[in-house]
Image (cartoon, rainbow, N blue to C red):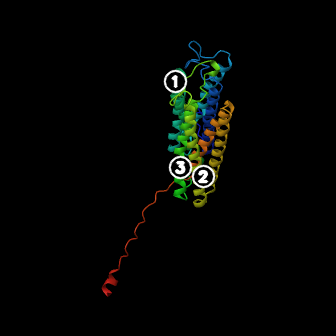
Amino acid sequence: MGLFRRTFTPREFRIVAYVALAVCAIIVFSGAAVRLTGSGLGCSDWPRCNGTSLTPELSYHALIEFGNRLMTSVVAIPCLLAVWTAWRRRPFRRDLLLIAALLPVGVAAQAVWGGLTVIFDLAPGWVIMHFLLSMLLLVANVALAWRATFESGTRPLARDRVSTWSVRLLVLPGFVSLTGGTIVTAAGPHAGGAGTGDVVERITWQGPGETLNWAIERHSTMGAILGLLSVAVWVIVRRRDDDPLIRRTTTVVCLLLACQGAVGIVQWQLHLPPGLVWVHVTLATVTWIAVLISACAGGRIRQVQSPVEPPERQVPARELARS
């Protein structure tokens, strides 16, 4: 019983928060590997692997898919631990507990949605939302890790509002670019069922032969816009804000986006080899985390209070009498 009454220091909670962030990113990488190896239907049912057995047969693709399912348990442990340590953290902070509570909810939603994705044979809409749910879960992960880094009331204040709002506004085009990437994947050759011989539905909005080119053109345009915006934000921060943290984070975002663009061009020229596509997905996830951290590094915008007029000087009665 003493274990359940144990309290945790801010440093111990911070470690748990960062571990939760790491595992929630890693499962995105493993999920991409499942799809790119054609193992998405290695287990053709859910929650069982097939209609009669919870565990898979000893086959390559079934083991890959089942291994990714087991990763959900690995992810759930630090996310549940984050809730418990937030509750038992001393000094207690309500904001950390509320954000930590989002993590197991997000993991559970991801598990159920992933199961439905399998049940519906990797239909594009289900797969797209499965990835985007992972990106939304990372928002909570980054927020928790960032707040855990500072004690209550000590998070950095914004030094320049223009810089702060600039880095925050990068989040929206960043998410739009991620969405565009999922549409490209849904129209591309890596449907997730090639290894098991399953025919998986593809997006064919512009016709079977043209949709991928159509999606690539729009995704590359969104990526270029995001890259230009990130450079503009970098220039704004360099000119207006001398905080080294926000300068470093915006620099990292620009470098990651440049790498993303280079990998994207190369993989397209090489006809989308699975290994490079996996690198592209991994970089997209890391870049998304960097964009979120940059938004946090912009600092808190303190409410500007209207100046209070000084009270009028009371004239003593003796001075009034003399006048």
Q: Amino acid at mark 1?
A: Leu
Asked if disc 2 and disc 1 are in contact, CB closer than 8 Å, the reply is: no
Q: Which residue is mark 1?
A: 116
Q: Which mark is residue 231?
A: 2
Q: Which residue is mark 3?
A: 168
* Element assignment for label 2: helix
| Structural distance between the alpha carbons of marks 1 and 3 | 33 Å
Residue 198, above or below 171: above
Asked if disc 2 and disc 3 are in contact, CB closer than 8 Å, the reply is: no
User: Which residue extends farthest top?
Assistant: 52
Q: Quadrant of residue 45?
A: top right
- For this rendering, which residue is in front, 69 or 206? 206
Quadrant for the C terminus, please. Answer: bottom left
Q: Quadrant of residue 4?
A: top right
- For this rendering, which residue is in front, 43 or 264? 264
* Element assignment for label 3: helix
Residue 225 position within the rendered picture, expressed as x and y whole percent measured from the top left: 56, 47
